[in-house]
Image (cartoon, rainbow, N blue to C red):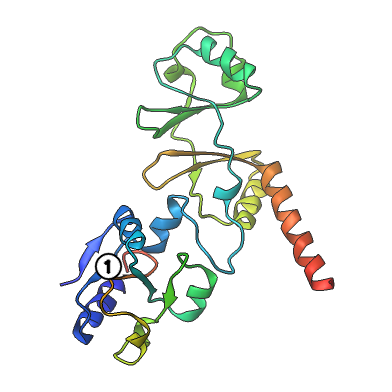
Amino acid sequence: MPTAIDRDEVQRLLAEGAQLVDVLPRPEFEEEHLPGAINIPLKTLDAETSRRLARERPVIVYCHDYQ
Amino acid sequence: MSPRAAWRLESIGFTRVYDYVAGKADWGSFGLPLDGTKGARAGEHVRADVPTCQLEERLQEVRRQVTAACWDTCIVVNASGVVLGRLGRKALASEEDVAVEAAMTAGPSTVRPSITLSEIVERMQSQNLTSALVTRSDGSLVGVLRRTDAEAALNAAAFDSSASTQG
């Protein structure tokens, strides 16, 4: 089950080497995103596109807010 | 959207999946950096050294300190730094010896540090404001954005952009 986390936990996990994934559509990602995030829009998220991510490291997903 | 993405990643086989549910709106509202094409943000140009005071302080003492610091406003905060009010020029010109609470404007309007400079400048110009109070989403004070600072930063960015286009 995915774990919901807050801002402080995001920063702690990033310091540990977590991967940050912005799941918003490409134009919204390009306009504004967290430093170091990669973009895999939700509509394209599958086994193929998630190959960019290392399975052994934590993955943090986010979008704009509570959508 | 992110909860569905988190579940999708788990279904693909990822085991350490976290969902930052409050997302980039929360990140930006705390003045943390964002990358992208959206442009400079208010948080980068805020004056964090604006004087602050608390409700129970005496107006005349606060007035003396604010004047000595060459400011014309003072932000009223609680012990956690949450904004409760503001003393503007008019309040600070008063010679009444009252508590700050009696003299302040309560619940002043605020903006988040993630608002873009162009948006806040447009708002300050249309409402004829000389400054904007910047707070995080929990209400704590970041500082004051002066319109002159924001306009200068926007003009500098436009000049840089124009120079790089021409160069």
Q: Chain of mark 1?
A: B
Mark 1 nearby-residue class (10 Å; few <14, some 14–19, many ≥20):
many
Image-quadrant location for residue B85: top left
Query: What x and y, as percent, mark residue A30?
Result: 53, 74
Q: Which residue is mark 1?
A: B19
The percent position of residue A5, horizontal first and vertical second, equals 26, 60
Relative depth, front residue between B74 and B33? B33
Q: Is residue B84 left or right of residue B65?
A: left
In which quadrant will I find the C terminus of chain B?
bottom right
Dot 1 lies on which element? strand
**What residue is shown at x 41% (from left), y 39% (from top)?**
B140
Give the percent coordinates (x, y) of residue B40. 61, 57
Query: Which residue: 54% across, 71% down?
Result: A31
Outermost residue toward the right in this view: B166
Q: Eyeballing the image, is A3 above or below B118?
A: below
Three-letter amino acid code of the residue under disc 1: Asp
